[in-house]
Amino acid sequence: MSRPILTAAETRAAEQALFDSGVTVEALMARAGRAVADRAWDRFGPVPALVACGPGNNGGDGYVVAQRLRQRGVAVRVCASAPPTSPAAQAARAAWEGPVEPLAEAAPAPLFFDALFGTGLTRPLDEAVAAPARALAAAARHRVAIDLPSGIASDDGAVLSTPPAADLCVALGALKRAHRLMPGLAACGEVVLAEIGLDAASSVVEIEPPRLAAPGVESDKYKRGKLLVAAGAMPGAALLAALAGQRAGAGYVELLGLSGDAPPHALVRRAWDDAALEDRRIGAIVIGPGLGTESEGARRLARVLAGDRPLVLDADALTLIARQGPATLRGRAAPSVLTPHMGEFARLFPDATGSALDKARHGAAATGAVLLLKGACTVVAHPDGRAAINPPAPAWLASAGTGDVLAGTIGALLAQRSDGFAAAQAGAWLHAEAARLAGPLLIADDLLAGLRAAARACL
């Protein structure tokens, strides 16, 4: 089941449901603190530690962390920016069996815990708190953030104050929006989830590994999905999309607009012919990679948009649609998936503001299409407001042609299931996993072998 990604309000509601069931604030704090301490112990071992505590319940979690580590024999110290103010945090402070140093006077330790401010922060930190916290984090060998790095807005990932960057961020109970949205995610490091009993739900979830169906005994190449990829001025981009469609499982891939014979011979190539678009066996069409934005590219796009096949619209197709206005897509009955990067998105929706999540939802609502917004955080949005965010992908994907591979991957999945929201999520996950398997210094062509391995693991 996909993991929910919560707002601060959704987190408070999930916690309140626990309190209504009889769980006390103190008991939940104890669960959270123990979970963080155990995660840090598992990762870093008995490293001398410094826990920086704030005045609220995030600070209370920190006192529990310190006591748990001390019981395990770790040399641990505590510093604080202010005395605890909530009853639960005061109880946790009272249970800590050691001294508490002023934050501004604390000496660094090899392991630093940021328990100053967590979910729900809405204003910048006082620099008298933020500056020493950053210095202590910078001097540490390992850095752990409890729930969120202090200074990050939990609902949109905005940086309210430059945070002490973490190597490990332990999300309490559920992922928060800032764990998956830039720029906050850049400060989180690796994010791990500590289960503390929250039963939460949200319209925004994390993209999970897809469940791909192997062909049955009754399958044929068309039942596995026929994908048509429209070529144009730069045929190499369309070729990458077509090859990705093959590796992502389409049973039949046709590259329209590029004739000739070359490996792989299983890829059907033919010169452009409008009549080829009428084949009722086509499950989806990918158009845009290398299409060109002059008259012939515009004509081919118009011809495809006039049809009734599910579409993946990328690259030059998005540039052409921006000239017409994205509302032109609203009349299409068949599913459409748009895959812009931030630059293409800005041309399509120049007035959109907010986080990547806000922008993707805006674009999906404006077009009536599923919109996958590519970037350091990749967001898939449905016109009805649902959204999914991919776990961070390897930064090596910032390379020419990788978006063409993504378009072809989504196209293959769309040809098989006619569900743009599911196809876009599965394509994003497979694309990122293919990059992880390809490793550093990848080029787009390297993703093709990785796609096969990534898909095999999901069968």
Image (tube, grey):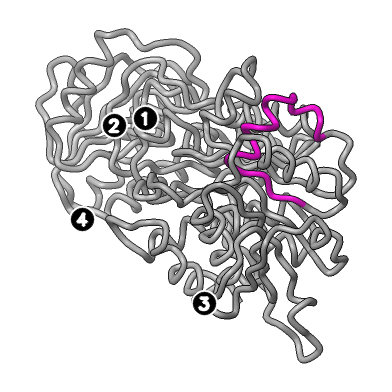
Q: Nearer the viewer, mark 1 or mark 3?
A: 3
**Local crowd size for mark 4, using a 10 Å CA cut-off: few (<14), some (14–19), many (≥20):** few
Q: Position of residue 417 (x, y in %)?
A: 77, 64
Q: Which residue is mark 3?
A: 264
Tags 2 and 1 touching, CB below 8 Å: yes
Q: Which mark is residue 165?
A: 2
Residue at 67% x, 62% y is: 271
Q: Residue 24 occupies which quadrant of the picture? A: top right
From mark 4 to mark 3, how far is it between C-alphas?
A: 51 Å
From mark 1 to mark 4, how far is it between C-alphas?
A: 21 Å
**What's under tag 4, amino acid-wise?**
Gly
From mark 3 to mark 2, how far is it between C-alphas?
A: 47 Å
Q: Residue 355 occupies which quadrant of the picture? A: top right
Tags 1 and 4 touching, CB below 8 Å: no
**What's under tag 1, amino acid-wise?**
Pro
From mark 4 to mark 2, how far is it between C-alphas?
A: 20 Å
Type of secondary structure dominating the magenta stretch: helix
* Residue 314 is one of the magenta-drawn residues: yes
